[in-house]
Amino acid sequence: MTTPRTLAAAIESNDNSFNLVRLVAALLVVLYHAGVHRIVAPGPDPLSALLPPTADIGALAVDVFFVLSGLFITQSWMRDPDLPRFIARRVTRLVPGLFVCLALTTIVAVIFFSAEGIAGLADPAPWRYIFNGAMLHWLVYIIPPAELALPKVLGGAPLNGSLWTVYWEGRMYVMVALIGFAAILPMRRWMMAMSLILAVAAFQFPTVLAGYVWEARLWTLFLSGMLLQTLAAHVRFGPRQFIVACVLLALNSTRWLDLEHQALTVFGVNLVCITLALWVGSSQMLRWRHLQRHDYSYAIYIYHWPVMIMLKNVLPPSGIWTMLAATLAIVLPLSVFSWHFVEAPALAYVRAALKRRRAIAAAAA
C-alpha cells in the first residue's frame, strides 16, 4: 500500500482534491434541503434517513466545510500574518459573491413572488436586506428576524436560510485574526496551543466569548482544522486512518446502543466523515485540472436555498428528486457565473493590489 503524502504536502500543492470535497459537501447540503423543501411529503433525504437522531447529511457536510475552513484559513494567516492583508483577503472571499447572490435573488423574489411586483423595489426593505446580508449583519450575535425575511415576499419565509453558517464563518475569521495578532510564541506553536485551549474552553467554560463565537459544534470543528494545520507536516490521511475511524465508530456503537438505543454518535459519524474528506482531499484523485483551479462550492451553497424556495412556489406537486434536479439546473450555471465573473476576479484584483503594495513598501524600505 502506497504511503499517503502528508497533509502539508497536499495543501501546499495545487494537485489535490479539496475542491472536489467542497463540491460534494455543497451538493449534499442541496440534497438535504431538497428533502426539506420538496412539495410532496417533506422529510429527510435517503441518506439522512439512515442517521437520525444523531445527525443529517446537511449537518455533516457543513461540519466538513468548517474543518476545511479552519485548516485553510489558519494556513492563510501563517503564510502572511499581517492583519490588514488578512482582512482584505477574507472579506474579498466572502462578500462580493454574497452581495451579487443576495441582490440577484432578492430582486427576482420581489418582482415575481410578491403582490407588489416590480414596484416593491421602491421599498427600502429589500435593499436593506441585501446590504445587511452582504455585510454579514456586522457579525452581531442576535440578528433581528426582520432582517432575514421580507414580509411581503414569499409569504415572509426566510429568503436564504443557509446563510447562518456564513455568519459563523465570518466570526471565526475574526477569531483567527485576533489569535494570530496576539501571538507571543512562534506562530505555529502559538496557533497549536490556542486551538487546544479554546477547544477545551468551548465546553468547559461556555460563557467565555458567549454572544459572539460560541456555536460550540462549528467552533470546535474549525479549531480542529486549525490544529491540523499546525500539525500538517506530520499527519497523513489514507485508507488506514479511515478504517481506524470506522472501527472506532463500531466500537462506540456497542455501548451507545445500550444507552440510547441507536448505534451512531455525533463524534463517531463526524470522525468517519471528516477522515474520509481529508483522505480524499489529500489525494490526487481529482485529475480534472479545471476543478482543481476553480471552486464552485460557495456559490452552490449560497444560491441553492433562495432558488429552491422560489421553485417550491411554481413547481407542481413533486418529490425530492424533481426538486433536486430543478434546483441544480439553475444553481450550477449560477455557480459558474459567480466564480468566473465575481469571486475569482475579485480575488485576483485583491491579490494583485496587495502584491503591488508590498512591492512599493519593499522598494521604499
Image: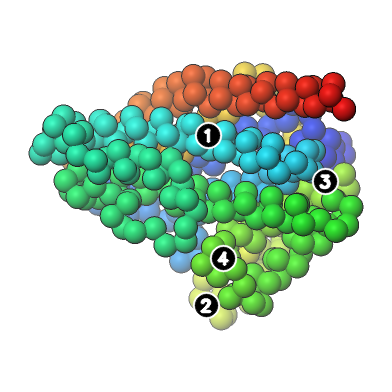
Q: Secondary structure at mark 2?
A: helix
Task: Indicate which disc residue 297 carries.
Answer: 1
Nearer the camera: disc 1 or disc 4: 4
Looking at the image, is mark 3 or mark 4 earlier in the sequence?
Answer: 4
Q: Quadrant of the C terminus?
A: top right
Residue 208 placement (x, y as % from top left): 62, 72
The Cα–Cα distance between marks 1 and 2, rounded to whole angstroms, is: 36 Å
Of badges 2 and 3, nearer the viewer stands 3
Give how far apart the Cα atoms at labels 3 and 1 are: 24 Å
Judge depth for marks 1 and 2 and give the one in front. Answer: 1
* Mark 2 or 3, nearer chain start: 3
Circle 4 is placed at which residue position?
Answer: 214
Left or right of residue 239, residue 271 in this image: left
| Marking on residue 260 | 2
In the image shown, does 188 or 140 lie closer to the viewer?
Answer: 140
Label 4: how many Cα within 10 Å (few below 14, some 14–19, many 20+): many
Q: Amino acid at mark 1?
A: Ser
Q: CA distance from mark 3 to mark 4?
A: 26 Å
Label number found at residue 191: none
x, y percent for residue 150: 24, 47
**Sequence-wise, which precedes: disc 3 or disc 1?**
3
The numbered mark, 1 or 4, whose residue comes first in the sequence reads 4
- Which residue is labeled 3 in the image? 232
The extreme bottom residue here reads 259
Locate residue 99 relative to residue 218 in the image: left or right: left
